[in-house]
Amino acid sequence: MSDQPQHDPLDAFVPGPRCTVTGASSGPLAGVTLAVKDLIDVAGWPTGGGNPDWERSNPVPTRHGWIVERLLGAGARIIGKTATDEVSLGILGENAFTGTPLNPAAPDRVPGGSSSGSASAVAGQACDIALGTDTGGSVRVPSSFSGLYGIRPTHGRIDFGGITVQAPSSDTVGWFARDADLFARVGEVVFGTSVPSALPTRLLIASDAFGFADPEVATALQPMLARLAAVVGPGEEVTLAPQGLSVWQWAQRVLQSSEAWQTFAPWLDAHNPRMAFSVARGLVMGSMFTDHERTRAALMREEARARLRHLLPPGTILAMPTTPFPAPKRGLPLSQLGFLRERISCLTSHGGLTGVPQVNLPGATVDGAPVGLSILAGRGQDEALLGVARAFAAAC
Amino acid sequence: MSDQPQHDPLDAFVPGPRCTVTGASSGPLAGVTLAVKDLIDVAGWPTGGGNPDWERSNPVPTRHGWIVERLLGAGARIIGKTATDEVSLGILGENAFTGTPLNPAAPDRVPGGSSSGSASAVAGQACDIALGTDTGGSVRVPSSFSGLYGIRPTHGRIDFGGITVQAPSSDTVGWFARDADLFARVGEVVFGTSVPSALPTRLLIASDAFGFADPEVATALQPMLARLAAVVGPGEEVTLAPQGLSVWQWAQRVLQSSEAWQTFAPWLDAHNPRMAFSVARGLVMGSMFTDHERTRAALMREEARARLRHLLPPGTILAMPTTPFPAPKRGLPLSQLGFLRERISCLTSHGGLTGVPQVNLPGATVDGAPVGLSILAGRGQDEALLGVARAFAAAC
């Protein structure tokens, strides 16, 4: 049972025996089934990180990650560990070692990553909720591509203990759900607070982000925007990134890649691990930025943070497309994927740069494939976003 | 038998069923057992290239490589395909996918690469001879590290059909043997000529190359140099690379890496293959040279060619250490291996740059590990080197 390999039609779970852990017998999440991205420690199970040499070169953890412990204590039951892009370095969800999980909502397309298996498992109804990490978009992108609720919480608000680090100044841990009520309830458990029934009263619409998305995406999101306005209040157009979304993206790329290189260089040196060419190339590029570039990028980060502090006081949320297009097809050549990746990160880089919380709302499709609408709030206002998501779903 | 996996204590052969092909029933190589580097086609067997995604993305060849056909026609019998550094990109012989072959002469050290399995199989007496390729040193280095006769033939002299290309302006196919007579006989079959009994009469000694090697290596090679002088004539000290061995190494690095990038970029783009980090990093670095750098390197190549035309008229050979040190220990971190690799290529880059033939003579050790003495001749004078090797062995 628990330690026998099971057939996995989603390819969402890591190969081998299925990790299962029973939580507390009662609590706000009693009966809720949970999948855990294989970058987050579950005691007694290897943390594979989507790479055979990562798994081999790291000890099997003896303690649960903080958030795992928290959810188990609230009654959730772990039913498996899920596939991830190698050591979280990827945004599309393709992994040649463990396989690319199915996108149940669009089987010919990638699931999005790096929390690919978690999104696939929830979308494929293998479990109720799943944990993911988000450094540069790894919860938000698969939420958008798979049609799920997904949250990137405020940076630094949730203990990152027992989770594989990529770029500490941007790393966060979040979760996916199909149901907005359950999605909010997980937040109450994790934050130890209540999601307020009073909603934000001011809605900003990021016109630069809508302009950057494919026109079909901007069009497909209009009914969701209208529903959001019905819940929160009429929308007001603003520019998210006065310096340019691509300038913010450049800054996040420099900072995140430099930190990732710092993080993984000792492992690369000691183990010369096998990895997909694209992953290795990304790490090498991260080693090449200069101090001057990092300084320029850090200054731009200060500007981005100031901008979001200005835009997002308590009571205000901002709406934007989560991704500029729905999931790309599976198996595209790197030369095509590279630019798609860069475009995606133009709509996600504000997260790593500024640390504000963001929730993906499902509900639109383009060419039959999901694409999500995001809402952002000021730092620490995660519960406000969960409340809006709940009200938004109730208004459907 | 032939298609059952066999236990391979050397780890010299590629995993899986052992490739066996019987050659002609008579001929100059009748009864000779042959191993073939897994970058060279044997009809009906995959050409794995030391990388699972290379094997997967290339069709099983329907024809033998030219040199394989030639040796089979002379009576040789194939007993296996041998491990290689991934797609020939490596000089030490470590491969995380197929395993690192044993260096039978120094079990705690690497075998040298990229023709690692071929050297291991011959040194371990699993076969009489083995084929390798040499672009930047891939026959010469494992010959030196494993204590074997090994030849990098004149560039362009042997048909490269049915062999995986790396950098066409430097790629060659050569062979290993323990026995100098058989080593020469293979040359007669491959070239369709006779190895002359008349030997070169002039011996040059590359003082810059001896100076570049570890002092213990230079000392250990002195008895071999003395024996060589007894066979050919008294040695005369010359400078191999007036511009600097490291300058020649830089030029070869630029040209070879740029060509390797050209060769493999379409495969990388289409398949995003899994590879060791170090291999991917080398390819990425090869993509970054500028046209200006390639032009400077090509000019330096012209100077190197002119230098060797000047030094090596017919009847003259040049002696130098094959490698600056014996084989490094297995499993060193990349930060240590990187500089060792660069130092090795300072003594091998003349091969790819100028195309002259080179033979490694075994016979010395440092700390119990083999290190070889190389002899070079002018382009097309391969047979002269084989004749010297035979006479050198007879003089022992």
Image (cartoon, coloured by chain):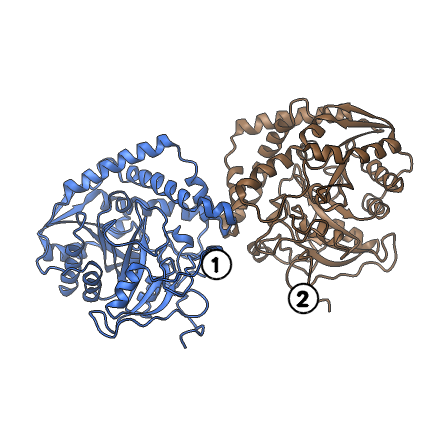
Chain colours: A blue, B brown
Subunit ID for the residue under disc 1: A
User: Residue A256 at what x, y percent from top left?
Assistant: 35, 43
Q: Is residue A165 visible?
A: yes
Name the residue at 62% across, 25% down.
B299
Identify the amino acid type marked 1.
Phe
Q: Nearer the viewer, residue A85 or B156?
A: A85
- The residue beneath circle 2 is B5
- The residue beneath circle 1 is A97
Name the residue at 82% across, 43% down.
B191
Q: Nearer the viewer, residue A170 or B55?
A: A170
Q: Nearer the viewer, residue A54 or B127?
A: A54
Subunit ID for the residue under disc 2: B
Circle 2 sits in a helix, a strand or a loop, which is it? Answer: loop
Q: Residue B35: which quarter of the image?
A: bottom right
The single residue placed furthest to the bottom in the displayed view is A1
Q: Residues within 10 Å of mark 2 (few under 14, many from 20)?
A: few
For residue A287, which numbered disc appears in the image? none
Q: Is residue A366 visible?
A: no
Discs 2 and 1 lie in a common subunit: no
Quarter of the image containing the C terminus of chain B?
top right
Identify the amino acid type marked 2.
Pro
User: Residue A300 at what x, y percent from top left?
Assistant: 27, 35
